[in-house]
Image: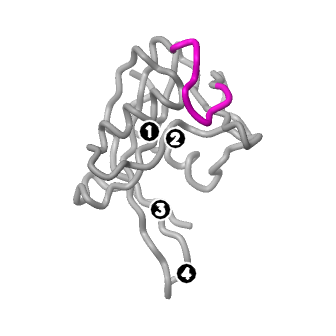
Amino acid sequence: MIVKFYDTVEDSLLKFAVIISKSNGRWVFCKHRERDTYECPGGHREATEDIFDTAKRELYEETGANDYTIQQVCVYSVTTGDNSDSKETFGMLYYADIKSFENELHSEIEKVLLFDELPEKWTYPMIQPILLEEVQKRGYDEV
């Protein structure tokens, strides 16, 4: 698996939005009801949805964030498979600073957790730590 970063790609290629988030200086992670791991908010783009709207919808659905600022960071891609049948898929990476959350979640997410340190048990350990590192490298989490 290979993760790459781009400034832009054709809009129609963007299939996912991932939102690296903090609240009061702590990392925001979600725990899915069916897993014992942690993940960043994010998900699939719907058919006629703008990718920025995907990010805002997923952030709200998965964390209950109702007061936040969100910024586009960059395009990312994930390539899976070997050279003969490799496939590159694209998503948009965002950074959000969450000021407040609703009391109730409206999705498959069991709970939202705030961490001072990054968790060890990632749902997508080959992808999301690299995305988070890119956000840090670009200085977004210092805002």
Q: CA distance from mark 1 to mark 2?
A: 5 Å
Horizontal side, residue 81 vs residue 71: left or right: right
Horizontal side, residue 96 vs residue 84: left or right: left
Q: Quadrant of the N terminus?
A: bottom right
SS type, badge 4 = loop
Q: Nearer the viewer, residue 93 or 50?
A: 50
In the rendered image, which residue does mark 3 sit on?
Answer: 78
Query: Do the residues under discs 1 and 2 have CB atoms within 8 angstroms?
Result: yes
**Residue 82: image tag:** 4
Instruction: Check if residue 141 falls in the magenta segment.
Output: no
Residue 17, placed above or below residue 10: above
Q: CA distance from mark 3 to mark 1?
A: 16 Å
Pick out the residue farthest to the bottom: 84
Tell me which residue sits at (58%, 45%) in the image. 129
Instruction: Check if residue 105 falls in the magenta segment.
Output: yes
SS type, badge 1 = helix
Tell me which residue sits at (49%, 46%) in the image. 131
Label 1 Cα neighbours within 10 Å, binned few <14 / some 14-19 / many ≥20:
many
Residue 40 spot, x, y in % from top left: 55, 38
Residue 29, placed above or below residue 130: above
In the rendered image, which residue does mark 1 sit on?
Answer: 135
Label 2 Cα neighbours within 10 Å, binned few <14 / some 14-19 / many ≥20:
many
In the rendered image, which residue does mark 2 sit on?
Answer: 132
Residue 39 spot, x, y in % from top left: 61, 40
Residue 47 spot, x, y in % from top left: 32, 52
Task: Give, as a three-letter code, the residue at label 3.
Answer: Val
Provide the major secondary structure of the magenta segment.
loop
Q: Which residues are magenta?
A: 102-111
Whichever of labels 3 and 2 marks the residue nearer the N terminus, that label is 3
